[in-house]
């Protein structure tokens, strides 16, 4: 359940990030275009550039930049968990060891994740998503937006499809 919660929290965070990009660009689907889906480590700089190009100087810029910088670590940890090889399970520690698929000079490919660690990543995404929502709302209110576009996810039919 912890892994699923983390994945759902990450999806909501990504959705809010796309909504923020689209609000800044003043184009409803801007954030959903592949060319605008930036890697986590490039997001802070690219978002600041987008804000400056489309909105100029706004009070939310530094907070958005800081939030996107804060999202790099949980995003990398989530990616390691989701895309790495689940190597071993330690029933005594209730943890898994995951081997990453990319060898980097400055990091160990193996990491251990407990349920508590995975839940902490989920909570971090939930917090970041809520903070991004507030910043996006502030931009829309100040600009006087009354968006016709509904950013909420579509309702699920029975059976989860």
Image (spheres, rainbow, N blue to C red):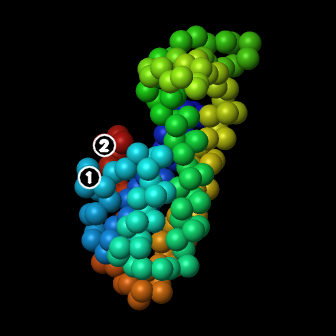
Crowding at label 1, few (<14), some or many (≥20) Cα neighbours within 10 Å?
A: few
Label 2: which secondary element: loop
Residue 58 % position (x, y): 50, 79
Residue at the spot of label 1: 35
Q: Residue at x 67, y 26 (%)?
A: 114
Q: Residue placed at 55% from the left, 79% from the top? A: 59
Find residue 161 and name its label: 2
The image quarter containing residue 143 is: bottom left
143 vs 115, left or right, is: left
Q: Which quadrant of the rendered structure holds the N terminus?
A: top right
From the viewer's perspective, tell me whether residue 107 is left or right of residue 53.
right
Q: Nearer the viewer, mark 1 or mark 2?
A: 1
Residue in the foreground of this view, choosing between 16 and 155: 16
Residue 21 tag number: none
Q: Position of residue 43 (x, y in %)?
A: 44, 54
- Residue 1 vertical position relative to residue 31 in the rendered view, above or below: above
Residue extending farthest to the front is: 105
For the point 37% across and 50% down, the residue is 38
């Amino acid at each position: 359940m912890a892994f699923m919660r983390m994945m759902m929290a990450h999806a909501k965070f990504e959705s809010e990030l796309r909504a923020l990009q689209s609000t800044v660009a003043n184009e409803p689907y801007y954030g959903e275009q592949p060319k605008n889906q930036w890697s986590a480590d490039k997001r802070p700089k690219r978002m600041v550039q987008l804000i400056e190009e489309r909105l100029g100087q706004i009070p939310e810029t530094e907070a958005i930049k800081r939030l996107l910088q804060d999202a790099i670590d949980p995003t990398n940890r989530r990616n390691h968990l989701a895309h790495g090889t689940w190597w071993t399970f330690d029933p005594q520690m209730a943890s898994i060891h995951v081997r990453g698929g990319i060898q980097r000079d400055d990091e160990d490919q193996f990491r251990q994740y407990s349920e508590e660690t995975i839940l902490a990543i989920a909570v971090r995404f939930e917090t970041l998503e809520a903070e991004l929502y507030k910043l996006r709302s502030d931009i829309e209110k100040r600009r006087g937006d009354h968006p016709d576009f509904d950013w909420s996810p579509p309702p699920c039919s029975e059976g989860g499809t």
